[in-house]
Structures are given as C-alpha cells and as structure tokens.
Amino acid sequence: MRALSIVLAVLVLSAGRVSAQSPATPAPAAPLAPAAEDEAPAWSYSASVYTYFLPDEANYGQPTMTADRGWVHLEGRYNYEDHHTGSAWIGYNASGGETLTWEITPMIGGVFGATDGIAPGYKGSLSWRKFELYSEGEYVFDLGESSDSFFYNWSEATISPVSWLRAGMVTQRTRIYKTDREIQRGLLVGFSHGPLSVTTYVFNPDDSKPIVVIGATVTF
C-alpha cells in the first residue's frame, strides 16, 4: 500500500508540472476593422474659349465648360451650333487600354436660342505613344425646321514630340459661318504649361483668306 501511495503521489506531481509548462491559450484575435469604402472620384473641370477670326464676317468667341466625375460628364456650350445659341449636355465616360488607350463619351444635349433642337453627340480619342486622334460630333435635330438639321464635327490628328507641344491636322464641319467648303481642313500647333493650353488653328491655309482660330483651355 505504501508503494502504491508513492506511485500515485509521483503521478499527481508530474501532471501538475506538465500543466504548468503548457503554453497559455492564445487570446482571441481582435476583430478586423471593416474595409474602408472606395472614395468617390473627385470632380474635374475645364473651361475653354475658341476665338474665330473670320475674313468676311464678324469675329466671335465660342466658350465651353465641362465637369466630370467618374462616368458622369456634364457640358455647356455657347455659339457652337449657331450664334446666340447655347447647348447643355450629359454624357457617359468610358475608357480603357494600356499602350493603345481610348476614351469615348456618348452624349445627349438640348440646343436653345437662335436654333432650338435635340442633339445626340459624342467625344472620343485614341492615343498611341506620341500620337493621338480626337473627334467630337453632334447631329442637331432642328425643332423649328427639320430641313435645317445638321451634323457638326471637329477632328484632330496630332503628334506630341515633347509633353508641352503638339502639332498636326484638323478638320471641321459647321454652319455657324459661311464657307465654300463642306469640310474645312487645316493645321494646328499647341503649347501647354501646367493647367493652361493654347492652340492656334489655320483652316484652309491655301485660300487667299484663311480662317484662324485660337483656343485657350484651363483644367482644374
């Protein structure tokens, strides 16, 4: 009996020692903080004025304002479709690509003033390295006289040898001033510094009286 008592005592002491050397149960992990929601994209804006110097008509300015946030595109124009005429637009921004990048914005607008109408339109560009193709167009369904409905277009093909310089060709189809050419074509050269860019366009340079347009744009 004494031997059995000694064996039991040794087992009890051994069990207590093993328990004392066991690692402590780890504390429960702190709950993970909820993932932060994606921040909404900020608004970006631009303001531009294109001044037309016409050889046989009065010169005029064509201002445009834009606001973009994510896919939303808002735009206002004046003297674009006609003199003393404004237009308001809403569009959907989409883009993609890496080396060859593209952007497209289908739009719908209302035209009011000397010309009243509804206008589906678009703006888009395709860029590869230092080259870019840009085009914007709209078809105005004239609500006063259907025969006055018209397709407007402005397109550019440019190269930028350095970041602050671009040069190339431009075409335009408009009826805001009189011209013998259905599609005018010309040359352009533009300079940029920070948020400001200035571009000079010369349409129909082979005519005796070419049309000069100077455009200034600020982005913010």
Image (cartoon, grey):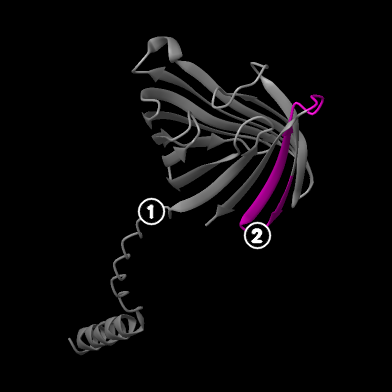
- The answer to whether 147 is drawn above or below residue 113 in the figure is above
User: Neighbour class for label 2 at 10 Å: few (<14), some, many (≥20)?
Assistant: few
- Image coordinates of residue 65 in percent, x first then y, are 47, 46
Q: Residue at x 61, y 42 (%)?
A: 51
Asked where in the image residue 129 lies, by quadrant, the reply is: top right
Q: Secondary structure at mark 1?
A: loop
Q: Which residues are magenta?
A: 190-208
Q: Is residue 200 magenta?
A: yes
Residue 209 visible in the snapshot: yes
Q: Which one is nearer the viewer's eye here, 120 or 103? A: 120
Mark toward the start of the polypeptide (1 vs 2): 1
- Image coordinates of residue 55 in percent, x first then y, are 69, 32
- On residue 40, the disc is 1
- Image coordinates of residue 207 in percent, x first then y, are 79, 24
Asked where in the image residue 74 lies, by quadrant, the reply is: top left
Mark 1–mark 2 Cα distance, whole angstroms, equals 25 Å
Main SS of the magenta part reads: strand
- Image coordinates of residue 101 in percent, x first then y, are 63, 36
Q: Does residue 46 appear left or right of residue 199 in this picture?
A: left
The mark total stands at: 2
Q: Secondary structure at mark 2?
A: loop
Q: Residue at x 29, y 75 (%)?
A: 27
Residue flagged by tag 1: what amino acid is it? Ala
Q: Residue at x 55, y 22 (%)?
A: 175
Q: Residue at x 37, y 13 (%)?
A: 145
Q: Is residue 143 magenta?
A: no
